[in-house]
Amino acid sequence: MSDSDGKKPLGLRGGPRSGQVKQSFSHGRTKNVVVETKRKRVIVPKPGAAPAAKSASPSAPSPAQQKKRPAGLSEAEMERRLKALKIARAREAEEAAAREAEERRRQEERERRRAEAEAKEREERERQERARQKAEEEERKKREAETRPQKAAAAEAPARPAPSRPAAKPATPPRKTDRERDSRRETKGKGSRDEGRRSGKLTLNQALSGGDGRQRSLAAMKRKQERARQKAMGGTQEREKVVRDVQVPETIVVQELANRMAERVADVVKALMNMGLMVTQNQSIDADTAELIVEEFGHRVVRVSDSDVEDVIKAEEDKPEDLQPRPPVITVMGHVDHGKTSLLDAIRNTKVTAGEAGGITQHIGAYQVETKDGQVLTFLDTPGHAAFTSMRARGAQVTDIVVLVVAADDAVMPQTVEAINHAKAAGVPMIVAINKIDKPEADPDKVRTDLLQHEVIVEKLSGEVQDVEVSALTGQGLDDLLEAIALQAELLELKANPNRAAQGAVIEAQLDVGRGPVATVLVQNGTLHQGDIFVVGEQWGKVRALINDKGERVKEAGPSVPVEVLGLSGTPEAGDVLNVVDTEAQAREIAEYRHEKAKEKRAAAGAATTLEQLMAKAKADENVAELPIVVKADVQGSAEAIVQAMEKIGNEEVRVRVLHSGVGAITESDIRLAEASGAPVIGFNVRANAAARKVANQKGVEIRYYSVIYDLVDDVKAAASGLLKAEVREKFIGYAEIKEVFKVTGVGKVAGCLVTEGVARRSAGVRLLRDNVVIHEGTLKTLKRFKDEVAEVQSGQECGMAFDNYDDIRPGDVIEIFEREEVERKLD
């Protein structure tokens, strides 16, 4: 059924007008569609309605407006809408006015700039005109001065007849000459096209002769235009050469030397070629050659060394008025398990000991504590285990006060003595905290008398060192300890300048999986801000984040504040000094210089100076067995302590060699290094990643994990003991006396013996004694009793013995019979 079958569409009279549209489809199909066109309703206002609408107020709508009010709207809602409309229109008017004012201001600014530019351009034109007129005047005077003697000479000379001029030549030259000139031009053009391919290359002849057929650069074209403009203005005088102070290090790249002299690289290369040096712009030359080049170009030479890069780290002396009081840094030291961390926990009201493996401290911890009086104290908690000597030494170097913790039930121990020596070497005051006073067997007086042997005289014994009896378990004496610390800090008058570039010491460093290299830094002077660029040891970085001891992010850290610093390029060594510098280039240059120096130092230490020394070392190491290991730890301090502990294991027969030590998880490269050397991989508080575990299983490399340094040292010591040669001990089992010697065909001489003591065994070793002198040592060829071969003969019985490869036996000789046994040795 088609749409045009005569039916009319439904609709109201006077409504939209209808029409038809013909639609076209594929394959020639068409369709007529009925469409409707709606007319817009035009409302004509009645006469007299407009003035009434104008006079009416928006807040009080007229009856006509009330009649036009949409259905469902209350009068209050209508008023609110009208009010909002009014406010919107007022805002639009204000914004339009503001835009108009801004446009006017910009127009005025543009006019002002245009006027300034025109004035400047006018002044420049006037100046150029004056310079041109001055140059023309000078040129005119110069020409007059040159022509004045000629005029005078012409006036004095007699008048001579003018020479006859030759006949004028024809204006048109011969056609043959034109053809020759055209042919030469064509030949020249062809040659230039052929040479176009090599126009961009600088040959040796061109460099030495000064010819440069290469295409000019944009800068050269600009210089040419500038010279042409100056020549047109009359300024033909050459520009004065700028003499520069050129810093020349021990080695310098040719391009860098040209940049420092502000000369073209091609000119510098050309000068070097004239000197007989065929170098490119990317090659290095020594300082003497660079000095000759600089002097040839007319500049002044300033010789500098590589170590001058560290001059940017200035050791500034702070003015007394800039110094402000800072919190004291207190290091807690003492023997292992004497309660250092527990005492610090009692002060901080935390539980750090529970988080340490084996209940012993194996890292340096840095904390800040605020006392009841509002005073801030910075505490450093150091390990007490024997392996952490370097950690304790670092803690003593950065501290102001040392709190020596001694257990009242254990008295002075080896690490206590070591801590005393560290404190004396650092020259810092000491406070003795006698801990575990709550135990029944506690004897604080014994601790005081034991300290006398190490020249530590406490106040109770009329000395100068403060001593406090405390108990970390019950909290007894903690207030007295804090009071003693505050008194000591007050006597020291500790001050620092917070308004300068920061300087600090790395207490600990580690490689975090999610955060990268992290360093625990104690700021000693200045203030470390987020975003500062710093150099620390062989590493550099930009402070990405600062985290305090409570795990909170901070924007800055002042003097005596311990913070974790994120954003390093690598893991620094514990004990390195952190210095803030101005630019990344300076930090990178200093770090690279220190890295090269450290590499040279390691190479010099590992290299034998002479062949004789090398041979002597090889001969000395010939009989030494080595146990190679690869060590990975969680923090730099632990790795350092493990390496030092490994170096102490061994004797003249066996030793432990650390192939590689580092911070972070065990990686695939560590496994491959261990596989090449047949070494186990030791992980201290770290684990191997998936790739490393897979390679270790394939290659059969052993990975051992430890969390307590006691177990690690004991296991490595036991493994090294296995490399020791067993001790051979001799055990005498019997004696036999030769009564008669017989000759037996096919055997040789056979001794008829009587076993006088012990037992004679066929497998045992024998010695032949003559007049109590050993004349032969060997083994038995045969042991017979009557005609039967036996394994052993008891004391008091007779037997026949024959020696292996020895026949010089006589009656009356004594045969000593012994056995050798191997005893396993252990390292001390």
Image (cartoon, rainbow, N blue to C red):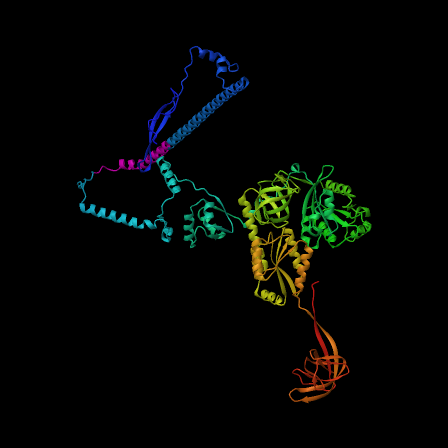
Q: Which residues are magenta?
A: 132-160
Which of the two residues, 453 or 134, is positioned nearer the viewer here?
Answer: 453
- Is residue 538 found left or right of 2 in the rendered image? right
Q: Does the stretch in magenta take in 526?
A: no
Please indicate whether residue 354 sits to the left or right of residue 17 in the image: right
Residue 625, position as x, y percentages in the image: 63, 65
Looking at this rendering, what residue extends furthest in the top direction?
48
In the rendered image, the quadrant that contains the N terminus is top left
Tell me which residue sits at (65%, 83%) in the image. Answer: 805
The one of 357 and 185 positioned closer to us in this rendering: 357
Is residue 153 inside the magenta stretch? Answer: yes
Secondary structure predominantly adopted by residues drawn in magenta: helix
Give residue 198's position: percent from left, percent from top: 34, 50
Quadrant assignment for the C terminus: bottom right
Point 49% across, 15% down: residue? 67
When the figure is inspected, residue 455 is found, relative to residue 827, above or below; the finding is above
* Residue 260 visible here: yes
Q: Is residue 142 left or right of residue 458?
A: left
Q: Is residue 642 above or below residue 825?
A: above
Q: Residue 526 falls in which quadrant of the image?
A: top right
